[in-house]
Image (cartoon, helix red, strand yellow):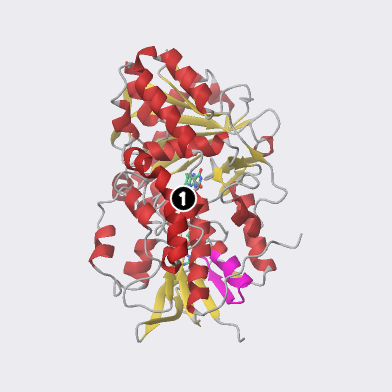
Amino acid sequence: MAEKSIIIVGGGIAGLSAGCYARMNGYRVKIFELHHLPGGLCTAWTRKGYTFDGCIHYLFGSGEGQPFNQMWQELGAVQGRRFVNHEEYQRLTDGTKTLTVYTDPDRLEAHLLDLAPGDEEPIRAFACGVRHFAHFDLTALYAKPRPLFDALDWRAFGAKMMPFVPSLLTWALTSMKAFALRFQDPFLRRAIPQMFSWDEAPAMMGMMLLAYMNAENAGFPVGASLEFVRAIEKRFIDLGGEIFYRHQVEKILTQNRKAVGVRLYNDEVHYADDVISCADGHATIFDMLGGEFTDRTIRRMYDGHLPTHQMVQVSLGVQRDLSREPHWVTHLLDEPILLAGEERSEVSIKHYCFDPSLAPSGCSVMEIMVRTNYSYWQRIYGRTLYDSEQSQISDILVDQLKKWHPGIQADIEFTDEATPLSYERYTGNWMGATCGWLLARETVPLMILGVPKTLPGLDRFWMAGQWVEPGGTVSLAAASGRNVIQLLCARDRRPFTASLPEN
Ligand SMILES: Cc1cc2nc3c(=O)[nH]c(=O)nc-3n(C[C@H](O)[C@H](O)[C@H](O)COP(=O)(O)OP(=O)(O)OC[C@H]3O[C@@H](n4cnc5c(N)ncnc54)[C@H](O)[C@@H]3O)c2cc1C
């Protein structure tokens, strides 16, 4: 059979995954990536001997034999890789009381009851939810794309989902912010909404995350995110794929309502039988395709009403050994601080001493993470104010840091700031969003029902990645790339095959 050709826009996780599965199924593949590195948002950078991770706090599928692990094996990402599994997800403190978010539901339950015996009802309900969702196999939503389901698949899917319908209806639509209102204890009412970093997070997501972590299936890849991505890039090249860095796609070319290729910003034109965009959804639909292939549903999705997540990350290389300190602490502030035009009452600080390969001996990598608003940064971008605002944010946050790590400013060797504009510039993601559509009450139904991987009125064109997998994550982005190749194989009437690397 003559090899059909595919062009993939974007060499992030979804693009690399789609590329690998396309090669496993006999398609010729070219990936065009705007950056000089693979991985997109899944990245890390090394400065002055410190490696700063920009992505994976937890990888679904890190545990052998567990959900998503087979996919990572096929992509050659986990073989021989060590993962760090934490017993504590993070701690939250107001300076007087501390909530330790243990991943083990029994331990978490006992600890919460110690903190607030009067809140037994919501505490037991939460721990029960973590135990319950430990049996929920998220891969049921991604093993096979829904358009390919036959009657037997639907029956099997229904049987898997049925026991979880009542708990999904309760916990998928309850945000951590709303759940906190069930607590009487004033400290827990403040801490619970921040347990999973954003207060709109559905309780179900948090329960599932803890369940995966407790099963050692959501670890941190030693060596950090870029090394993890490099393994998938190698798998793609070993399979015979071609990847072109610093090749930004300007337009997806169409003829008679079929995608036929791409034109790059350097004016090169490349043709293929199919085009898969694994780049930002908004830019794909409204810029690369000029908004020609949309309908009301798509326009509504991108009208700005769905939640997205933006953050500032200040990365520090410090000449101090923090390995005896808890690895992740969110401080609940007495007095809010003004950051990028908004008051913030929480500051999250993480160190990476659990992976000694990331810093020189006796030193530590620290990251301070704060949620922020895209429009503020956009307003000041391109003016000297942008640079001064970045360093001002570092100064304010380091000033806070001194309270919890006295004298730390003298030990800081390197400082670096990433704003939503940095994410937007380096990866093209709309409004610098860190995970596409943020998982929240409004987006959970889209996650469960699935977002189409095609556009209305356009043949031979597909989309994969975080903008068609609400909630994002590297695991769903990779599963998305796999799903698109399953759809392509079905259209071409060839059996979908997935193989493992030879060694
Ligand atoms: C700070 C942070 C923490 C995170 N933590 C976690 C975590 O703990 N666990 C987890 O699983 N996930 C996490 N995520 C989310 C995860 O990184 C993303 O959901 C996932 O990597 C998205 O992959 P993608 O391939 O869909 O998109 P992207 O990574 O955005 O890849 C798109 C690629 O397309 C390229 N591109 C864009 N436009 C063009 C163009 N015109 N031409 C050519 N190339 C183009 C970009 O450069 C990029 O490489 C985190 C993300 C961030 C930012």
Density class for disc 1 (Cα within 10 Å; few <14, some 14-19, many ≥20) is some
Viewer-proximal residue among 293 and 173: 173
Residue 362 percent location from the top left of the image: 68, 27
Magenta-highlighted residues: 18-34
Mark 1 Cβ inside 8 Å of ligand 1: no
467 in the magenta segment: no
Label tally? 1
Of all residues, the one furthest to the right in this rendering is 503
Viewer-proximal residue among 234 and 46: 234
Residue 157 visible in this rendered orientation of the protein: yes
Residue 296 percent location from the top left of the image: 23, 66
Residue 100 visible in this rendered orientation of the protein: no
Q: Quadrant of the C terminus?
A: bottom right
Q: Residue at x 47, y 56 (%)?
A: 156
Left or right? Give the position of 437 relative to 85: left
Viewer-proximal residue among 465 and 431: 465
Q: Residue at x 44, y 67 (%)?
A: 150
Q: Quadrant of the N terminus?
A: bottom right
Q: Of helix, strand and loop, which one carries label 1?
A: helix
Residue 284, picture quadrant = bottom left
Residue 336, picture quadrant = top left
Q: Is residue 176 above or below residue 257?
A: above
Q: Is residue 128 above or below residue 33?
A: above
Pointer 1: what residue?
160
Q: Residue at x 38, y 70 (%)?
A: 454
Residue 492 percent location from the top left of the image: 51, 80
Q: Residue at x 56, y 28 (%)?
A: 327
Residue 310 percent location from the top left of the image: 37, 45
25 in the magenta segment: yes
Left or right? Give the position of 242 relative to 464: right
Q: Identify the amino acid type marked 1.
A: Lys
